[in-house]
Amino acid sequence: MNPASRLRQLLTQKDFLVAPGAYDCITAKAVERAGFQAIYMTGMGTSVSRLGLPDYGLATMSEMVANASAMAASVAIPIIADADTGYGNELNMVRTVREYERHGVAGIHIEDQVFPKKCGHLEKKQVISQEAFVSKLRAAVDARKSQDFVIIARTDSNGVLGFEEAIDRANASLEAGADLALVEAPVSMEQLRSVPQRVDGPCVLNVLVGGKSPLLSLDAIAGLGYRCVLLSDVLLGTMMARCDEVLTTVRDSREPLGFKNALSPKDIFQRFGAEEWDDLRTEIPEQASEVVR
């Protein structure tokens, strides 16, 4: 089963789908190793890890696709990727969908912000008109080669035009052919509860620690009626904090560099298929290996 078909199957099953956010092959492999069934390629994590830039729409489509492609090649579970605004108008949206799909991504979310966008949990965002957003979504739906490729419509209008408009846009997105709706940054428990109740289709929740939305347990989110949750910064934030901690210890202690639970080079390489590559090495004919004796 290809990644898109597998993701669609997961989304139609009874079980609530949890997709932790990853931003490179290391974190993608960690999500898979932990037993999760899907991965979310976070745009925030991609921007800061690959470019050293904030999530302000500064990453290009090709840079985002390149990261998603590498991650998809490193794991067997499906990847949902951030596709920002589609990087332009309807024509750009068509190419965006085709590129993500061609590189093994199982699904994307597309948002209604003005480009260049900002992280959905920041202030001073701008959104395009509902009509323009729906037009881009229709282009995205028509552009996919396989009907299994999942398209999530994300609206950031809650923080700009209000909650009623956000619900209206979510429903209009589903009517336009999107598979799921994501109302970004609900700001209260009342809004969190209302989204699955008032949107006429499956809903996704995007969770950020320190973001605008109340933090709930995964079981509580599922109980509200959401179909899927994206844990955008669950690894990014903890990784950055752990790096600070380790490096401060190294700088200040001057002690031998032994850290609890640290992986050895052998362990690291085994996680990424070293045994398979070692087997391949032994099969290479000697005359082709250029061995110096």
Image (cartoon, rainbow, N blue to C red):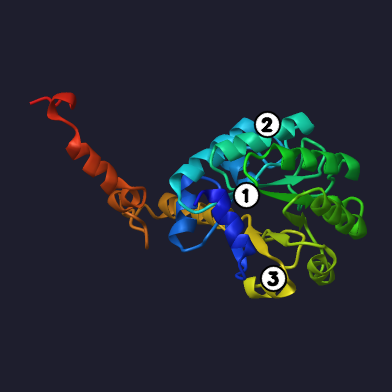
Q: How many marks?
A: 3
Amino acid marked by disc 2:
Arg
**Which residue, given by chain and number where applicable, does mark 3 sit on?**
221
**Observer able to see residue 52:** no
Image vertical order of residue 200 relative to residue 156, above or below: below
Residue 175 coordinates in the image, percent (x, y): 83, 52
Camera-nearest residue between 28 and 109: 109
Q: Would you identify the image quadrant in which residue 10 lies?
A: bottom right
The residue where tag 1 is placed is 148
Q: Which of the 4 quarters of the picture holds residue 219? A: bottom right
**Distance between the alpha carbons at the discs numbered 2 and 1:** 17 Å
How much space separates mark 2 and mark 3, taking CA atoms?
34 Å
Q: Is residue 103 above or below residue 242?
A: above
Q: Please, what is the three-letter code of the amino acid marked with disc 3?
A: Ile
**Crowdedness of circle 3 by 10 Å Cα count: few (<14), some, many (20+)?**
some
Q: Position of residue 18 (x, y in %)?
A: 59, 63
* Marks 1,3: beta carbons within 8 A: no
Q: Quadrant of residue 203?
A: bottom right
Whether residue 34 can be seen here = yes
Q: CA distance from mark 1 to mark 3?
A: 25 Å
Front-most of residues 24 and 3: 3
Q: Quadrant of the C terminus?
A: top left
Circle nearer the N terminus (2, 3): 2
Residue at the image position 79 percent from the left and 36 percent from the top: 115
Q: Label 1: how many residues lie within 10 Å, few (<14), some (14-19) or many (20+)?
A: some
